[in-house]
Structures are given as structure tokens and as C-alpha cells.
Image (spheres, rainbow, N blue to C red):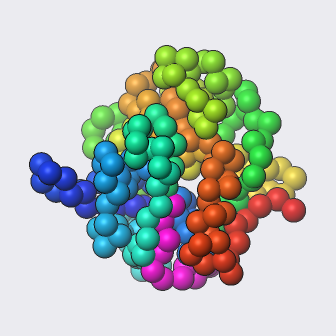
């Protein structure tokens, strides 16, 4: 899990924002497009910082690692149409991430997993009960639902619908992973990343389907650092 810190620069001024993100290779991190872009403008790489291995803001362990962005990739459709369209981004890091017992990649799959009506896990530092961001990394259970359940959010093929009662996604959870434990491999696979429908309590929420953007991610990897590979089930 990555704590993503972004300084947004807009015509109205600048502001700081936090999101979640995931490591998928030693040089690539994925998050939501709205975490790194405002309107048609992708934020400059120098405005983006990622903290790895962070669990409790009040009790640093000394094992946290900060990496910087070299390039940021956002799908063209998102920049043209906004939040409901291809809310996915890839950050190519300046530094090579060294994996250890607390920092490592999440597995992803090129095809959609059969997880409808199954339980998954969401992680993030988002606002808790609207009282401010959490000081430590939290986990919550969600259930993957049929896309029709999220009809009010006008879902698309690249979306995943989840029921989040009694906890919901909230500000700061954006871009963070929703993962599923594959019992065959005993490894977590990322199903989606938090997109929209935040802080709405008992209503279902929308996240961005990773499998839909698998090809896009592989093209970015090929363009930036073809020697690395994503983790997936053999």
C-alpha cells in the first residue's frame, strides 16, 4: 500500500491532496486518475511524492521509503470526459523500489476474476466518520456486487460495484486498492481501485476494474521500463 501525496496546481491556486496507491512493479505504481489530474491537466511529476511501508503516521518505524515520480500516465478518455471515464493512472517512479518484508507488489490479473457476491478488503488512510484522515492504515470489508446494484452511479464496463456497509470509502481512500485473497496461492490480488461514490454510507460505491486496464498498464511498462514485470497467478 502506498500513501500518495500530491500538490495540485490550478488556475485558482494550489492545494495538497492525499490518496492511496499500489505498487505493481519495482518502477510502477497505480492509482486513480483523479488523484493526479485536475480536469485536463495532469500534475507535474515533481509535485508527486509516494511513501512506502507506512502504517502509522504517529509512530514512524524508520523503514518507510519515499519515492518520487518521473512520469505520470492518464488515459486520454479521462482527460476528455472526467471522473466517470477511465479513472486510472500509472506513475513511473524515479527510483527503483527495493522490495522487502513490508514493501512489495500486489498481484494483478489480465482477466476479470469471478468474485461477484464475494468478500474483498479495502485499505486506506481516508476520513473516518467525517472526522479527519486516519493516522494509521485501516482495512475494511466490502462485498463485490453485480454492476446493476450501482445503477445510480451510471457504471461502465471498467467499473466494479461494491457494497461497503457498515464502512464506506471516504476522502483519502481514493486510488487505494480493493483486494481479494486467492486461497490457491495465498496471495492478495488487486481487483480494483477506489474511484467514486465516496462518503455515502450505505449506498454502494464504484471502483475502477484493474483487469480492464491491464493492457494499458503493460503498454506503459513497455514504454518506460520493459525489464520489469507485474505479479500474476501462474
- Give yes or no for residue 27 being in the magenta stretch: no
Residue 154, placed above or below residue 218: above
Q: Residue 211, how many percent across, how many down?
A: 69, 47
Residue 50, placed above or below residue 128: below
Secondary structure mainly formed by the magenta segment? loop
- Give yes or no for residue 96 being in the magenta stretch: yes
Q: Residue at x 53, y 64 (%)?
A: 29
Q: Residue 80, how many percent across, how many down?
A: 40, 42
Q: Which residues are magenta?
A: 90-102
**Residue 61's quadrant in the figure?**
bottom left
Residue 51 visible at all: no
Residue 103, placed above or below residue 141: below
Q: Residue at x 66, y 40 (%)?
A: 120
Residue 231, placed above or below residue 188: below
Q: Residue 47, how many percent across, how many down?
A: 29, 68
Q: Residue at x 41, y 33 (%)?
A: 198
Q: Residue 23, how many percent across, how many down?
A: 57, 65
Quadrant occupied by the C terminus: bottom right
Q: How many marks?
A: 0
Q: Residue at x 40, y 61 (%)?
A: 4
Horizontal placement of 104 versus 136: left or right?
right
Residue 34 visible at all: yes
Amino acid at each position: 500500500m502506498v500513501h500518495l501525496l500530491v500538490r495540485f496546481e490550478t488556475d485558482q491556486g494550489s492545494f495538497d491532496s492525499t490518496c492511496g496507491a499500489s505498487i505493481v512493479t519495482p518502477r510502477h505504481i497505480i492509482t486513480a486518475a483523479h488523484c493526479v489530474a485536475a480536469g485536463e491537466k495532469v500534475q507535474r511529476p515533481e509535485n508527486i511524492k509516494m511513501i512506502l511501508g507506512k502504517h502509522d503516521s504517529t509512530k514512524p518505524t524508520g523503514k518507510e521509503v519515499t519515492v518520487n515520480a518521473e512520469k505520470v500516465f492518464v488515459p486520454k478518455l479521462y482527460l476528455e470526459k472526467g471522473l466517470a471515464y477511465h479513472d486510472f493512472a500509472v506513475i513511473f517512479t524515479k527510483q527503483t523500489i527495493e522490495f522487502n518484508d513490508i514493501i512489495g507488489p500486489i498481484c494483478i490479473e489480465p482477466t476479470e476474476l469471478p468474485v461477484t457476491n464475494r468478500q474483498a478488503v479495502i485499505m486506506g488512510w481516508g476520513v473516518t466518520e467525517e472526522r479527519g484522515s486516519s493516522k494509521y492504515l485501516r482495512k475494511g470489508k466490502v462485498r463485490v456486487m453485480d454492476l446493476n446494484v450501482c445503477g445510480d452511479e451510471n457504471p461502465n464496463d471498467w467499473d466494479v460495484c461494491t457494497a461497503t456497509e457498515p464502512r464506506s470509502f471516504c476522502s483519502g481512500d481514493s486510488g487505494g486498492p480493493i483486494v481479494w485473497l486467492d486461497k490457491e496461492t495465498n496471495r492478495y490480488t488487486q481487483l480494483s481501485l477506489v474511484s467514486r461514490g465516496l462518503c455515502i454510507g450505505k449506498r454502494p460505491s464504484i471502483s475502477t476494474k484493474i483487469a480492464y486496464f491491464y493492457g494499458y498498464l503493460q503498454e506503459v511498462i513497455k514504454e518506460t521500463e520493459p525489464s520489469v514485470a507485474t505479479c500474476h497467478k501462474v
